[in-house]
Amino acid sequence: MIRRIVVLLALVVMSGALIFGGVHRTQAVLASESGTSGGAVYETGGGPATNDESGVRDGSGSGRHGGGGSNGSGSGSESYTE
Amino acid sequence: MREVLIERQGTPSRRTLVHWAMVFMLSISGLLTTLTGIYFLVLPSGGYQGGRNPDYGKTFLFDRDIWVGIHRWAGIVMIAVAVIHIVLHWQWVTEMARRSMAIARGQRKPFNHKIWIRLAVVSVIGLVFLGVAASGIYFFVLPEGRAAKFVVFLFGRSTWDLIHTWASIVMIIVAVIHLAQRWKWVVRVTQGVARSAFAWLPGLRRPVVRGSMAVQERLTEGGVL
């Protein structure tokens, strides 16, 4: 009986972890999909620079994938500081 | 007389050995594809993506290409072995289909709940296996690359990716349930195989299988039920 409960628990934990990973991957795939088809994708990215401090808030940027967005007009070289 | 025969044979039959070898190879290749698949769940994309991919350039143990290679080839082996596994059990598949139809028509007494659960598990595995195998072959034929991104075969690449991801997740979960259901058979036959493989060792020289014919038949059936 105890063995069955342990197996069931392990199965539930494993399923949960896999589903969590699946959701994570799905989000990445969908984000990548919208990135290649244009649109306001790059919320924080500022083009081919890095994904860190040089981003433009709500800007469209000019990333390698995807076209210009509709929510902003920043460029990759702009920066903001908190 | 039959009991004596069982006692003397002691080792699994050739048919059982073939089934066991299939299950063994399926388990090893399945484990490899699962472990490498988990890598792709944790680090979903290796591409650059214009600075919005925080996982870009991350590695774990090996380069991403090596993970892709292991996943691809272990997956191909798994598909091949799974097809052989299905072929070996084809008689069981057709028989269960025939009996299920007879039950549906009311010509036969229903299965007990254990058989129904096993039948459901095997059916789900079979269905999702089609999705995993088809999408896996798609990615094998059209590996990642700039040109492949724009090739559409029935669906876009992202749709194939999602089919592969979710069919694999369901298949892993249900395959673990299937293995748990058949665990006693796996343990019993593995012990028999180990005994016959290491029969030259003192202490393991004489394999002993006690029990009724029913037990022996379960040993040799190698089937799903």
Image: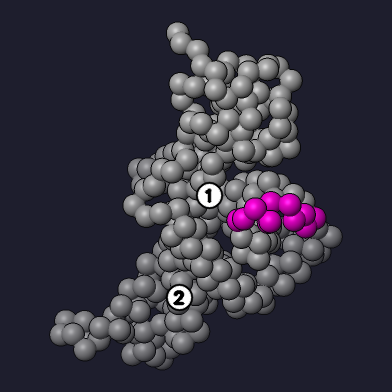
Q: Nearer the viewer, mark 2 or mark 1?
A: 1
- Discs 2, 1: same chain: yes
Towards the viewer: B200 or B50: B50
Left or right: A62, with B211 as reference point: right
Check residue B123 in the rendering and tell me which mark sits there, or answer none: none
Q: Which residues are magenta?
A: B144-154
Q: Is residue B177 above or below residue B76?
A: above
* Residue at 35% over, 79% down: B193
Which residue is under mark 2? B20
Alpha carbons under labels 2 and 1: distance apart: 21 Å
> What is the chain letter for disc 2?
B
Where residue B212 appears, as percent x and y from the top left, is 42, 77
Left or right: B80, with B150 as reference point: left
Where residue A54 appears, as percent x and y from the top left, is 49, 22
Where residue B24 appears, as percent x and y from the top left, is 43, 71
Q: Secondary structure at mark 2?
A: helix
Which residue is under mark 1? B173
